Image: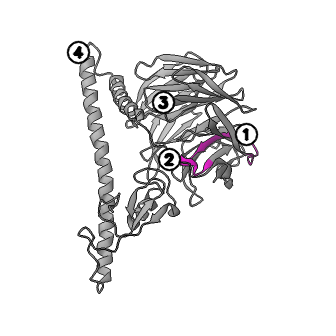
Amino acid sequence: MLCGLSGAVCEVPVVNIKSGHVYEKRLIEEYLKTHGNLCPLSESLVAPEDLLPLKLSTVATSAAPPSKVTASIPSLLSALQTEYDAHALEMFELKQHLQTTRYSCLLHHTTLKQTASSSSNGESSDDPWVHVTAAVAARAKELAHYRKKERHVEELAKTPASLHAKTSQTLHQTDKPGVLTVDIKGERVLTGGNDRHAKIFNTSTGKVEHTLSGHAKKVQKVLFHPTADIIFTGSADKSIKLWTAPTYQAAHTLDGYNGAVTGMAVHPTGSYLGSSSDDSTWVFHDIGTGSLLKSVSSEAKAVHDVQFHPDGAIFATAQADSTIRIWDVASTKNVATFEGHTGAVNSVWFSENGYHLVSGGTDGIVKFWDLRKLKSVLELNAHSAVHAVHLEVGGSVLGVATDKVTLYQETGKKNWDVVKTFEEHKGQVTDVKLANQLEFVVSTSLDRSLKVYA
């Protein structure tokens, strides 16, 4: 059996029972320690009990690794083994970087072709948006092709009904109480509060790893970059700060707003950040340089949220005028408008398969919109104002934040039932996020607390 990390024959093989990948035990244990318990191939959370030892045949084969016959020098063997492990892990990461570089080169090549074509048609090649649209088109084509194939959706690690309040953390200052927003990546949780700070909390250790300070007003939105060690914080001070690991110092301050930042989303290319503001605009920034690429007015009231479609060709904005607007990224035009809410729309989220959009607003209604039919196909009554909605990546469980946390599960075609309700918060619930495979759920509230359900 070959290790999924090193490519070498396993001496002590273990299998990730969630993904089926086989690894050398010591290598995968070392990798998980340094990468937040994320499986290197499936990128799902892996607990120690998820690694099942495999028994190998005792019959000798030519492919078997050499036995350690030099037991008289154990220190030397240990040193060699440690060095080998380090090289194996480094080789795996180099292969990942190589794949990323290859994709970047292909993307750059596509961009140059698009730019040359635009120039021949009289368009300015100096316009950075030409490069953006080329990158977006290339990525959308790649992802659309992938989604046409049969996708493997991993089963839930836990049922919604089995979740219970595990921990409650009071993270932010008492002089300005209230945790307003939350995001998750692996075992880490990112929060932002009325106290103008953002905090990185590790659910495994139960400790705050970093406190990010620098905003002049409350932090209304926080976001992990999905693939890079970058954090974004959006504030009522009309700016977004970009923080980079390992020290999480502010690398860029993104501007271009005349109002508070209300929403943020990383484009599937990983290179651009879309954001919204209560000044009625949505904005595009280059993550690498921090430069402003595009600012477009929605010609309506405040924009409360923004989310990209999984393919990246379109995105949705939640509007204060009770509508949801669908925008084409390349042309920056409003290509569809969903009407049906009777109050401001606070939150939107796309299903991972790209077929549906979920929205929630002050009217207490959660709506499912079919993007193929451009109409609402399902309504759920949350009975009070909805502040946030979030779909688990598999698409079968929905989290809704109102004055409590409610989990809905798909039980049939166009049928979603309440399967779990958490009422531990003593104030308005401001945000909710569901970890992949429902490993855990987190919520934040004006009562200053972050709660973890597992």
Q: Quadrant of the N terminus?
A: bottom left
| Mark 1 or 2: the one toward you | 2
If you read the primary sequence from the N terminus, does the residue marked by circle 1 or circle 3 appear first?
Answer: 3
- In this rendered view, identify the residue nearer to me: 123 or 371: 371
The mark found on residue 154 in the picture is: 2
The image quarter containing residue 179 is top right
- Label 2 Cα crowd, 10 Å radius (few <14 / some 14-19 / many 20+): some
| Label total for image | 4
Task: Tell me the element at label 2.
Answer: loop
Q: Quadrant of the C terminus?
A: bottom right
| Mark 2 or 3: the one toward you | 2
Q: Is residue 430 magenta?
A: yes
| Mark 2 or 4: the one toward you | 2
If you read the primary sequence from the N terminus, does the residue marked by circle 2 or circle 4 appear first?
Answer: 4
- In this rendered view, identify the residue nearer to me: 287 or 247: 287
Instruction: Give percent across and percent down for residue 81.
Output: 31, 72
Task: Tell me the element at label 1.
Answer: loop
Instruction: Give percent across and percent down for residue 268.
Output: 42, 35
Vertical relation: 105 (above or below) 89: above
Q: Which residue is mark 3?
A: 309
- Per the rendered image, the range of residues in magenta is 422-441
Which residue is at 51% across, 22% downward?
A: 372
If you read the primary sequence from the N terminus, does the residue marked by circle 4 or circle 3 appear first?
Answer: 4
Identify which amino acid the numbered label 4 is placed on.
Ser
Task: Tell me the element at label 3.
Answer: loop
Identify which amino acid the numbered label 1 is placed on.
Gln
If you read the primary sequence from the N terminus, does the residue marked by circle 2 or circle 3 appear first?
Answer: 2
- Label 3 Cα crowd, 10 Å radius (few <14 / some 14-19 / many 20+): many
Cα distance in 3D space between marks 2 and 4 = 47 Å
Q: Which residue is mark 4?
A: 120
